[in-house]
Amino acid sequence: MWWLLPCVLGFIRLYLDGVKVLLYQLFNRSFILPAGNEEHEGLAAVKKIREELNQGKVEFMYLDLASLTSVRHFVQRYKTKGLPLHVLVNNAGVMLVPERRTDDGFELHFGLNYLGHFLLTNLLLDVLKKSGKPGKCSRIVIMSSATHYGGRLTLDDLQGRMCYSAHGAYAQSKLALLLFSYHLQDQLWVRGDPVTVNAVDPGMVDTALYDNLSSPAQLAKKPFAKLLFRTPAEGASTAIYTAAASELEGIGGLYLYNGRKTESSALSYDQRLQTKLWKESCALVGLQ
């Protein structure tokens, strides 16, 4: 029965982290700015932006982060356009889904939430570097979560084959994103590249991400969601702030929650673990 222990602990840690976040959101106002992965939703958003702004250009380009082939095709299409890239927000994700594999055979949380973003960012780094300059750096924003505090990274079983836990897999993917964020920023600083990398936590936001909660958690969520959970607009505020705020110019390696610099887990700052994960990730996605 010992092999069930990681699954049980992953479940407990994730819900404890969730309770802590809800208590924070109960007693603290949401950060508000001063001012989809579905194709039809993306096109509808583009139409709405064009109608409301009536200026500038906006375009939707399809990308499936659960497919490394799709990621590579997207990057090729983007680079063919010859456009600069000043801001990259890595925001896609799934949460607590039943055990499933991506097109490339990776556990879905790890493959979509983390590896897809890892490959996308690395393939676009050259464009980001060329687009940035001293005093006006390009910015990478990576969406993590408070669940990373309970996350554990098992390098010899990143795909959860020994004991699958949706709760543990989700927390692991969010921890991996932080390890990636910090390690990438260190590399960029060493080379003096004009690109910053910051990770953000949107808080608990009332979206379809929570559709896979356990039945008791679903029942507990319903009466409190409108009161305690943040709206999608509120959840997006910290990411938009990190991508655009002038006071963050040239500043990277942060973890921001509710618009404020916050300490992430001690494990996320482990440089040896960051390096090991980076090397393993490169091998998994076929990067040199």
Image: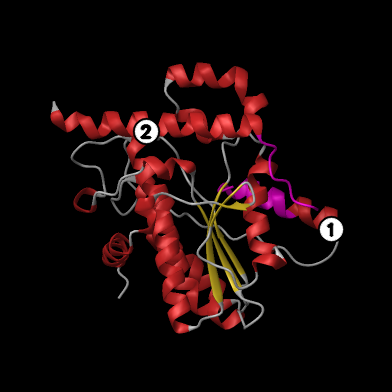
Q: Write the start and end of the magenta stretch as one range.
A: 28-46
Asked which secondary structure carries label 2, the reply is helix
Where's residue 234, x and y in %?
A: 68, 42
- Residue type at mark 1 is Leu
State the CA–CA distance, disc 2 to disc 1: 44 Å
Where's residue 268, x and y in %?
A: 38, 54
The C terminus, quarter of image: bottom left
Asked which secondary structure carries label 1, the reply is helix
Q: Is residue 85 above or below residue 161?
A: below
Q: Which residue is mark 2?
A: 13
Where's residue 101, x and y in %?
A: 32, 45
Q: Residue furthest left?
A: 1
- Camera-side residue of 196 and 254: 254
Q: Nearer the viewer, mark 2 or mark 1?
A: 2
Could you tell me if residue 180 is visible in this image? yes
Could you tell me if residue 122 is visible in this image? no
Horizontally, residue 166 falls left or right of residue 128, namely left
- Camera-side residue of 30 and 223: 30
x 23%, y 53%: residue: 155
